[in-house]
Image (cartoon, rainbow, N blue to C red):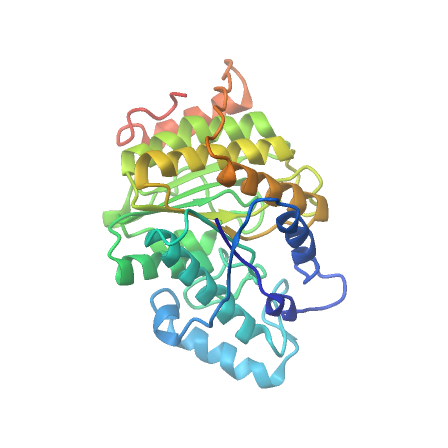
């Protein structure tokens, strides 16, 4: 397994007390360092304009370049921008491209990118939600353009909906975007009926979840919605927008996922990658604002990816009237005509 870490990712620094802070990577790094198995280390390089312009518009790049001499400043109420932020954001996107390329070329088995700033809220022409460039979207496009992949699955289990990623691909049937997220919550998008546009209708699958959901709901949705959708789509690679802010300790959300829950999620997606696309699987850090959640989530992802043989995750029961039943039924009402196995464990 390849791991992307770099001390420069901590040089994107904002106001005192901001939740998206450099110290987040200390918890992730400690979990990586605790692994006994050898890990391949990769060194990031900055994404160039051509790579970024596959997802973002030229005006967005120009605004960030123009903001650099004036930094530090706020791009919006949530998103700060420091003197090194543009450089670091390019390293996050470029590093993820190269890591994903190495996985697709089978130079390594799988990958984990411990990058900052996160990316899934960044729109084509706007930074938002702590995000400057949409790292996963940029990497997905690079795999299609440079490596010839026809279909990419982007699975987003961050506790916030990835509005930027959805909007990047909602008209494109070659990318399946699947998101589980707390709802209603920031950024306010991602309801069940947001299923894509035009030729891309049906290749956006949203599962908005009420506050208080934990392992049973997340694992059950992964088994009964995400897995059938992935098998229907049959991707050539899977990229995971891997936020750990659904963890029960996270200060910015109200979900109850444990380390065991993240292990089950990562194991299921690892098995899907093994089954559908030769194990081509990359996890990219998004949110997560409790040190405990970052450490436990990272450890869970590494354990799932590094096990010689993944363990079997038992099907989660779905009794009548349960939250899980309501979520699966609502997703099925939108998507079952295209995904006939949706709802089955």
Residue drawn at (49%, 55%), measured in percent from left and top?
A: 120
Coordinates of residue 169 in the picture (x, y in percent): 34, 53
Coordinates of residue 236 in the picture (x, y in percent): 29, 46
Is 11 left or right of 107, judged from the image as shown? Answer: right
Q: Name the quadrant containing residue 144.
A: bottom left
Closer to the camera, 46 or 163? 46
Residue drawn at (37%, 41%), measured in percent from left and top?
A: 279
Coordinates of residue 10 in the picture (x, y in percent): 64, 66
Residue 219 versus residue 154 in the image, above or below: above
Residue drawn at (41%, 77%), measured in percent from left and top?
A: 59
Residue 65 versus residue 160 in the image, above or below: below
Residue 160 versus residue 44 in the image, above or below: above
Is 255 left or right of 139, judged from the image as shown? Answer: right
Closer to the camera, 127 or 240? 240
**In the picture, which quadrant includes the C terminus?**
top left
Coordinates of residue 310 in the picture (x, y in percent): 47, 30
Residue 175 versus residue 55 in the image, above or below: above
Residue drawn at (42%, 24%), measured in percent from left and top?
A: 329
Residue sticking out furthest to the right: 16
């Amino acid at each position: 397994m390849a791991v992307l870490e770099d001390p420069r990712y901590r040089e994107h620094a904002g106001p005192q007390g901001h939740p998206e802070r450099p110290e987040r990577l200390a918890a992730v790094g400690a979990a990586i360092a605790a692994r006994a198995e050898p890990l391949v280390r990769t060194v990031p390089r900055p994404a160039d304009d051509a790579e970024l312009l596959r997802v973002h518009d030229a005006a967005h790049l120009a605004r960030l370049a123009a903001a650099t001499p004036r930094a530090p400043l706020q791009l919006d109420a949530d998103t700060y921008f420091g003197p090194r932020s543009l450089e670091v954001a390019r390293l996050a996107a470029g590093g993820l491209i190269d890591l994903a390329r190495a996985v697709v070329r089978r130079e390594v088995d799988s990958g984990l990118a411990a990058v900052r700033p996160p990316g899934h809220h960044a729109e084509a022409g706007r930074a938002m939600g702590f995000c400057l460039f949409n790292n996963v979207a940029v990497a997905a496009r690079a795999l299609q353009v440079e490596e010839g992949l026809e279909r990419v699955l982007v699975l987003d289990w961050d506790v916030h909906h990835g509005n930027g990623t959805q909007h990047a691909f909602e008209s494109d049937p070659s990318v399946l975007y699947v998101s589980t997220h707390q709802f209603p919550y920031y950024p306010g998008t991602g309801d069940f009926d947001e299923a894509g546009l035009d030729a891309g209708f049906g290749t956006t699958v949203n599962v908005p979840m009420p506050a208080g959901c934990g392992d049973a709901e997340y694992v059950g949705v992964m088994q009964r919605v995400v897995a059938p959708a992935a098998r229907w789509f049959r991707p050539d690679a899977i990229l995971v927008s891997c936020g750990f802010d659904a963890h029960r300790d996270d200060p910015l959300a109200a979900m109850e996922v444990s380390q065991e829950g993240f292990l089950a999620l990562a194991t299921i997606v690892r098995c899907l990658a093994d089954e559908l696309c030769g194990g081509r699987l990359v996890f990219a850090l998004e949110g997560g604002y409790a040190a405990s959640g970052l450490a436990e989530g990272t450890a869970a992802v590494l354990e799932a990816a590094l096990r010689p043989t993944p363990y079997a995750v038992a099907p989660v029961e779905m009794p009548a009237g349960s939250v899980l039943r309501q979520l699966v039924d609502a997703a099925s009402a939108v998507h079952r005509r295209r995904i006939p196995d949706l709802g089955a464990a």
